[in-house]
């Protein structure tokens, strides 16, 4: 939404410049010759004044690069906040104070959701690889002892991002028919493919939070849905998966 | 992007995170005409079934017109989210199943 509003402004600026067949010269009234200063009539009608030079060097870099007057650049201010009644939360609030801390520390830091190919992610994964390996081996032994023949097999399906959300117009979802199996075990190297690191953990925790990469893909799709159809025409329901593979998904969503 | 959410039934107000600040918002202040203001259309509303086990709260079930994005998260029990009760389009998102190692590690 921010991108849309900014993009809209840029479009307006481009239109403005496109309609101008002559180079735009900031602050120059149309009734004066182009090589004169807007203040020149106060001094000498044909000689630019030192004040004019100083004034131009103070123009914002973006305005000079785009040849855009500051009056047009001014609206590039963050959008206005929601306008319903709200009460600020104090950081000392026992129940909600941690949200204040979180917002102050992490709001707007897109790098918090670093891709797992980040050097930091590599370090985190390397530091924990042995632990995960031991855990996988231990679980494998336990699984055989319990007669679990599905140990370390994938319990789900690997679908393309396009298949992740199957939406029909009547609001009833359907499952994708793709059933490509994904080899996925604690020993495989696909940590980088299926996980991301969130460097926004509470200060009491040093390590980042490992999250599924699928969350970010779902977020991207929701953003796409929200930005289409005039914004917010659709609503979304996100469901989890109970019991990790205990129930087939098609039963869960077709009943 | 402003985010209004409620994830626990014990909460009385909604929580709004906006521009590096956190706010409480009373339900009574979430009137339809407020939510449909153009200033609020960029907002996301996140509702969890832990806060509203009976489904999407009525204050967000309004008709056509621009509005914030509503995301309701729920367990897959169809009694929680089945669409027949709502007379509107609902987008249902189903994640890929969790692999076993993911479930144990995350």
Image (tube, rainbow, N blue to C red):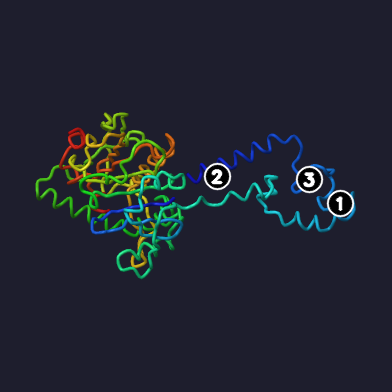
Indicate which disc residue A6 carries: 2
Examine the image and state in which quarter residue B7 appears: bottom left
Query: Is there CB contact under 8 Å for labels 1 and 2?
Result: no
The residue that appears at 27% across and 58% down in the rendered structure is B12
Query: Which residue bears the numbered disc 3?
Result: A29
Nearer to us of marks 1 and 2 is 1
Q: Position of residue A111 (x, y in %)?
A: 45, 54
Indicate which disc residue A163 carries: none
The residue that appears at 44% across and 51% down in the rendered structure is A82
Distance from label 1 to label 2 (Cα)?
A: 37 Å
Q: Position of residue A100 (x, y in %)?
A: 39, 63
Q: What element carries label 1?
A: helix
Examine the image and state in which quarter residue B13 appears: bottom left
The answer to which of marks 3 and 1 sits earlier in the sequence is: 3
Q: Nearer the viewer, residue A173 or A143?
A: A173
Q: Is residue A161 left or right of residue A16?
A: left
Badge 3 and badge 2 both on one subunit:
yes
Q: Which chain carries label 2?
A: A
Indicate which disc residue A41 carries: 1
Quadrant of the image containing the C terminus of chain A: top left
């Amino acid at each position: 939404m921010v991108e849309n509003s900014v993009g809209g402004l840029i479009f307006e600026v481009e239109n403005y410049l496109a309609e101008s067949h002559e180079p735009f010269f900031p602050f120059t009234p149309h009734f004066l010759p182009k090589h004169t200063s807007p203040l020149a009539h106060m001094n000498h009608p044909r000689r630019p004044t030192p004040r004019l030079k100083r004034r131009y060097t103070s123009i914002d870099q973006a305005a000079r690069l785009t040849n855009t007057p500051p009056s047009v650049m001014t609206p590039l201010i963050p959008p206005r906040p929601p306008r319903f009644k709200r009460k600020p939360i104090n950081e000392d609030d026992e129940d909600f104070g941690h949200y204040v801390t979180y917002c102050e520390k992490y709001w707007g830091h897109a790098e918090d959701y670093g891709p797992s190919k980040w050097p930091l992610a590599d370090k985190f994964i390397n530091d924990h690889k042995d632990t995960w390996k031991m855990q996988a081996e231990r679980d494998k032994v336990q699984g055989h002892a319990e007669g679990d023949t599905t140990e370390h097999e994938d319990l789900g399906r690997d679908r393309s991002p396009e298949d992740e959300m199957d939406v029909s117009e009547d609001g009833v979802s359907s499952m994708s028919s793709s059933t490509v199996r994904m080899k996925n075990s604690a020993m495989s190297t696909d940590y980088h493919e299926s996980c991301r690191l969130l460097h926004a953990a509470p200060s009491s925790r040093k390590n980042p939070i490992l999250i599924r990469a699928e969350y970010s893909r779902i977020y991207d799709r929701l953003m796409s849905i929200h930005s289409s159809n005039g914004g917010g025409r659709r609503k979304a329901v996100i469901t989890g998966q109970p019991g990790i593979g205990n129930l087939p998904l098609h039963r869960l969503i077709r009943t | 992007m402003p985010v209004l959410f409620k994830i626990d039934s014990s909460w009385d107000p909604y929580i709004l995170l906006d521009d590096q600040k956190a706010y409480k918002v009373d339900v009574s202040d979430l009137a339809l005409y407020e939510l449909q203001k153009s200033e609020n259309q960029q907002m996301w509303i996140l509702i969890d079934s832990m806060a509203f086990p009976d489904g999407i709260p009525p204050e967000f079930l309004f008709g056509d017109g621009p509005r914030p994005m509503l995301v309701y998260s729920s367990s897959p029990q169809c009694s929680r989210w089945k669409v027949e009760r709502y007379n509107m389009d609902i987008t249902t998102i189903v994640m890929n199943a969790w692999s076993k190692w993911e479930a144990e590690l995350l």
